[in-house]
Image (cartoon, grey):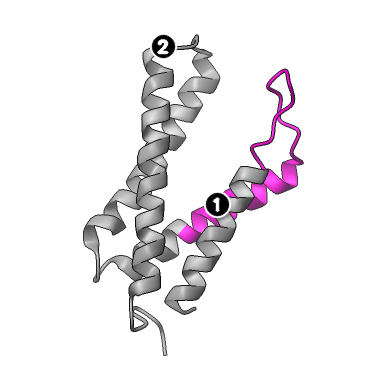
Amino acid sequence: MKNKTLAIFGIGTYILSVLSSAENLEGASVAPVALVAISGIATLIFIVLATIRLWKEARILAITLPSSAFILFVFTIIQILVGPSYGSPVIILLNLVKVINFIVFILVIVKLFRMEKITNEIK
């Protein structure tokens, strides 16, 4: 898989994650369970492939991408289990982590588009 193809795959996984986060007025998920599962698996595959691809070129991005995704996952689980009120520190930290994760994702996509050669590819 080429770097630009991996970047386009990452954009596709982001679109899938947005589609799978649809909720009704009560806050219940309306997306099919299969779509949520496919989105999660595709996102995990993208994170692993992008981390491997970026390891030699941009080690800081290769570390921050899975780290921010893991922290976002943990805060999302905490939000589901605790059910904090609007404006609580958990909600503020969750939103901050979402923004950081999005910025790191954009930086990874830009870096993948700008990388010239294919690295870590088995020939």
Secondary structure beneath dot 1 equals helix
Can you identify the residue that label 1 sits on? Answer: 14
- Residues shaded magenta: 20-46
Mark 1 burial class by Cα count in 10 Å: few <14, some 14-19, many 20+ = some
Give residue 108's mark.
Answer: none
Secondary structure beneath dot 2 equals loop
Mark 2 burial class by Cα count in 10 Å: few <14, some 14-19, many 20+ = few
Q: CA distance from mark 2 to mark 1?
A: 27 Å
In front of the other: 101 or 37: 101
Whether residue 89 is situated above or below residue 12 in the rendered picture: above
Residue 55 spot, x, y in % from top left: 28, 66
Number of numbered discs? 2
Residue 32 spot, x, y in % from top left: 76, 41
Tell me: 80 left or right of 4: right
Name the amino acid type tagged 1: Tyr
Residue 113 lies in what quarter of the image? bottom left
- Identify which residue is drawn at 40% across, 41% down: 70
Q: In the image, is residue 34 part of the stretch drawn in magenta?
A: yes
Residue 27 lies in what quarter of the image? top right
Q: In the image, is residue 97 part of the stretch drawn in magenta?
A: no
Can you identify the residue that label 2 sits on? Answer: 88
Residue 109 spot, x, y in % from top left: 41, 62
